[in-house]
Amino acid sequence: MNKALCRCVLLALVSFQSLWAQEAPAVWRCGNEYTNLPKQGQACTRVPVQADVITTAPRKFRAVPQGPAPMPNTAVIVDAPRIDGPTQRARDQQSQKILNEELKKQLHRCQKLPANSTEMVRCQADEAALRRELARLP
């Protein structure tokens, strides 16, 4: 009975040896891409891979709700009436006039401030912002 058990174990080991000695799947490198199925016409080289390399599927994480769901990023379409050319030019001129007045006020404020003070730095930054806005006008 002991011999029969040894024969069964030996037979099982020999039959399972083919499972253990399976060849690793072919991995190909096509440029910077690694794939198991290279495309026709690509210059791909086979990469040697050890048989004991195991790959797993990526995990799928469950999102934990934390408050209300965010609104989807959709564009809001506003039905604004079209403005004719002369009206738009008048609006542009008015905004240019307002910005020029603000710039004059800002320059007057900057002249009253002491040099190298934090207020002066802020005043110069505001002045630069007004000049940028004026430069954007048509």
Image (cartoon, grey):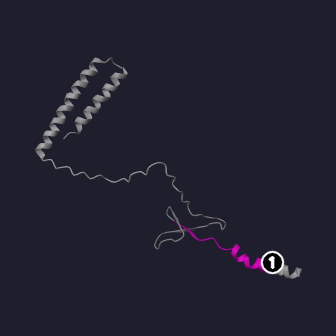
Per the image, the residue denoted by label 1 is: 9
Q: Quadrant of the N terminus?
A: bottom right
Residue 25 colored in magenta in the image = yes
In the image, residue 98 lies at what x, y percent? 19, 32
Kindly state the secondary structure of the residue where label 1 is placed. helix
Residue at image x 24%, y 51%?
78
Which is nearer the eye, 27 or 131?
131
Amino acid type assigned to the residue bearing label 1 in the image: Val
The residue at the point 23 percent across, 39 percent down is 136
Viewer-side residue, 98 vs 28: 98
Q: Residue at the location (36% across, 53% down)?
A: 73
Residue 19, by quadrant, is bottom right
* Number of marks drawn: 1
Q: Is residue 83 left or right of residue 54?
A: left
Question: Does residue 129 appear left or right of residue 54 in this picture?
Answer: left
> Magenta span has 128?
no
85 to the left or right of 77: left
Counting from the top left corner in percent of width and height, residue 77 is at: 26, 53
Position of the C terminus, as image quadrant, is top left
* Span of residues in magenta: 9-29
| Position of 13 relative to 92 (above/below) | below
Question: Which residue is at the front of the view, 8 or 137?
Answer: 8
Residue sitting farthest toward the left: 86
- Residue 138 vs residue 74: left or right? left
The residue shown at (23%, 24%) is 105
- Where is residue 22 drawn, in percent x and y? 67, 74
